Amino acid sequence: MANTTSAKKATRKIARRTEVNKARRSRMRTFVRKVEDALASGDKAAATAALAAAQPVLMRAAQKGVVHKRSASRKVARLTHALSKLA
C-alpha cells in the first residue's frame, strides 16, 4: 500500500488512466471486429465503410499510447489487404 501522499496520488492517477485506456482498447477492438465481420460475410461495401471508421480509431489509440504505432499500422494494412482480396 502507498505510504506517501504523492504515492497515493500516483495510485489514483494510474487507476484513472487504466480505465481510460481500457475504454479506448475496447472501442478499438469493437471497430476492428466490425471490419472482420463484414469481411467474413463478404459484404465489400460494409467492409469498406467499417474500415474507414476503424482506421482513425486505431490511429488515435496508437497516438494515445494504448497500442504501438507500428501495431496499429500493421492492423490497418492487414485489414486493407483483406479488403482488396475480397474483390
Image (cartoon, grey):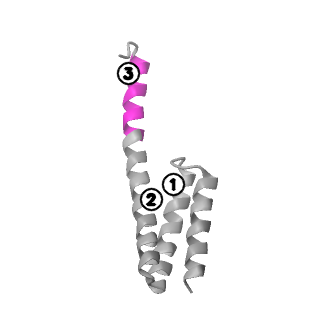
Marks 1, 3: nearer the viewer: 1
Task: Identify the image quadrant of the N terminus.
Answer: top left
Residue at the spot of label 3 = 8
User: Which labelled disc corresponds to residue 13?
Assistant: none
Pointers 2 and 3 in contact (C-beta within 8 Å):
no
- Identify which residue is drawn at 46% across, 65% down: 32
Residue type of the residue flagged with mark 1: Ala
- Numbered range of the magenta stretch: 5-17
Task: Identify the image quadrant of the C terminus.
Answer: bottom right
- Judging from the image, what secondary structure is the residue with disc 3 in? helix
- Disc 2 from disc 3: Cα separation: 30 Å
Q: Residue 56 placed where, x, y %?
A: 52, 65
Residue at the spot of label 1 = 61
Q: How crowded is mark 2: few (under 14 residues within 10 Å), some or many (20 or more)?
A: many
Q: Residue 34 placed where, x, y %?
A: 41, 70
- Identify which residue is drawn at 47% across, 72% down: 53
Pointers 1 and 2 in contact (C-beta within 8 Å):
yes
Residue type of the residue flagged with mark 2: Met
Pointers 1 and 3 in contact (C-beta within 8 Å):
no
- Disc 1 from disc 2: Cα separation: 7 Å
Q: Which tag, 1 or 2, sits closer to the chain's start?
A: 2
Q: Residue 65 placed where, x, y %?
A: 54, 47
- Judging from the image, what secondary structure is the residue with disc 1 in? helix
Q: Which tag, 2 or 3, sits closer to the chain's start?
A: 3
Q: Which tag, 1 or 3, sits closer to the chain's start?
A: 3
Residue at the spot of label 2 = 28
Q: Residue 16 placed where, x, y %?
A: 37, 38
Residue 15: within the magenta? yes
User: Which residue is nearer to you in this view: 79 or 26?
Assistant: 79
Magenta-drawn stretch, dominant element (helix, strand or loop): helix
